[in-house]
């Protein structure tokens, strides 16, 4: 019998900034007469990452392009892949590069499709999907060699964990402020835009068709709890003051993932954790050991 998923968080969050009341009014009016149109437009918005204002890049290294995917390579040794989150870019993981290279590791940092310097995804323009972020990791590993480790942040952590659960090989895995089940954010998304349960159902059906898989297959703890094969040694890092991802998601993943270690911090939030000296030391020690 398959194990059930640990209890999901009831925290309502969204990918969107506050929506003006006038926009919500228009969505509400359309929702009553054209729910399919609203569902289609909402899915398009869901698949469009918000670009970060911080465009800091990583100096040095060797630039590469694997199809539409742009990235850089640093150092020599067993390879560690750095995976940024939704709406992010590889420069956000810049603080990890030097310490990993100093530990005798080769670092590959890249931008997911429709992010950073990479080209469009399969949907064109600046749109992409979680499954496409998963396949991007496979593309980069195929081009640059076996993974000693994958270190991933936020939605990139969810994508990396799901890719590993689908069979992407890596010896070690680090999940920083991971999302346990990205589909739980649909509730906040629907509330922010102001569309109904009827439209939300249509939206979810469209999402499943686009992803070519059931939404339940995107639940990391559920998948991990029911895996029938060995998984890589995994470190999960979450922060209680995270305002973008629920810190309870990290605990859910760690409980379900066989042998995972959970480290819970305070006061670092969603992104500052990537620049924290103690966090970086933990990541390097886990990856290099």
Image: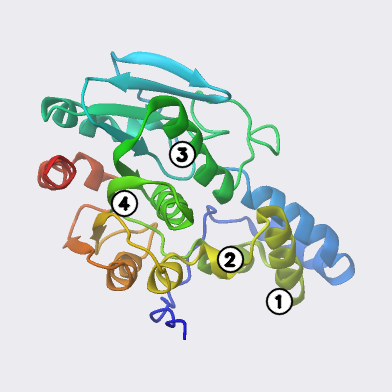
Distance in Å between CA atoms under marks 4 and 2: 19 Å
Q: Nearer the N terminus, badge 4 or badge 3? A: 3
Residue farthest to the right, as pictured:
33
Badge 2 crowding class, 10 Å Cα cut-off, few under 14, some 14 to 19, many 20 or more, is some
- Indicate which disc residue 179 carries: none
Residue 186 is marked as 2
Q: Position of residue 259 (x, y in %)?
A: 22, 66
Residue 50 appears in the rendering: no
What is the distance, in whole Å, between disc 1 and disc 2 at their CAs?
11 Å
- What kind of element bears circle 1? helix
Whole-angstrom CA distance, mark 4 to mark 3, is 22 Å
- Residue contact between numbered discs 3 and 2, judged by CB atoms under 8 Å: no
- Residue furthest out toward the front: 229
Q: Quadrant of residue 232?
A: bottom left
Residue 252, x across and y down, in percent? 33, 72
Which of the two labelled residues, at mark 1 and mark 4, occupies the earlier sequence position? 1
- The span from disc 1 to disc 4 (Cα, nearest Å) is 30 Å
Residue for point 10% across, 42% down: 281
- For the point 42% across and 44% down, which residue is it? 85
Which label belongs to residue 197? Answer: 1
- The image's mark for residue 270 is 4
- Tag 4 near tag 3, CB within 8 Å: no
Label 3 residue SS: helix
- The disc, 1 or 2, on the residue closer to the chain's N-terminal end is 2
* Picture quadrant of residue 84: top left
The secondary element bearing badge 4 is classed as: loop
Residue identifier under label 3: 137
């Amino acid at each position: 019998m398959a194990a059930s998923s640990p209890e999901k968080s009831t925290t309502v969050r969204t990918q969107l900034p506050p929506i003006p009341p006038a926009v919500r009014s228009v969505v509400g009016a359309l929702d009553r007469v054209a729910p399919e149109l609203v569902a289609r437009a909402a899915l398009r918005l869901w698949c469009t990452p918000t670009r970060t204002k911080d465009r800091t890049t990583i100096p040095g290294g060797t630039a590469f392009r694997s199809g539409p995917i742009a990235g850089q390579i640093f150092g020599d040794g067993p390879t560690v892949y750095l995976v940024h989150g939704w709406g992010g870019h590889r420069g956000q993981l810049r603080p990890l590069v030097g310490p990993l290279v100093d530990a005798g590791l080769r670092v590959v940092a890249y931008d997911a499709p429709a992010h950073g310097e990479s080209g469009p995804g399969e949907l064109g323009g600046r749109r992409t999907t979680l499954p496409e972020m998963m396949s991007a990791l496979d593309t980069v590993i195929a081009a640059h060699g076996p993974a000693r480790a994958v270190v991933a942040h936020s939605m990139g952590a969810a994508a990396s964990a799901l890719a590993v659960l689908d069979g992407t090989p890596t010896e070690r895995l680090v999940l920083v402020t991971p999302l346990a089940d990205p589909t739980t954010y649909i509730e906040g998304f629907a509330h922010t835009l102001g569309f109904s349960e009827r439209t939300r159902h249509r939206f979810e059906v469209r999402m499943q068709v686009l992803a070519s898989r059931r939404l339940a297959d995107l639940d990391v703890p559920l998948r991990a709890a029911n895996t029938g094969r060995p998984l890589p040694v995994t470190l999960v890092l979450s922060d209680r003051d995270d305002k973008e991802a629920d810190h309870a998601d990290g605990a859910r993943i760690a409980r379900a993932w066989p042998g995972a270690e959970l480290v819970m911090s305070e006061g670092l939030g969603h992104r500052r954790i990537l620049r924290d000296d103690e966090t970086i030391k933990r990541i390097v020690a886990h990856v290099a050991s």
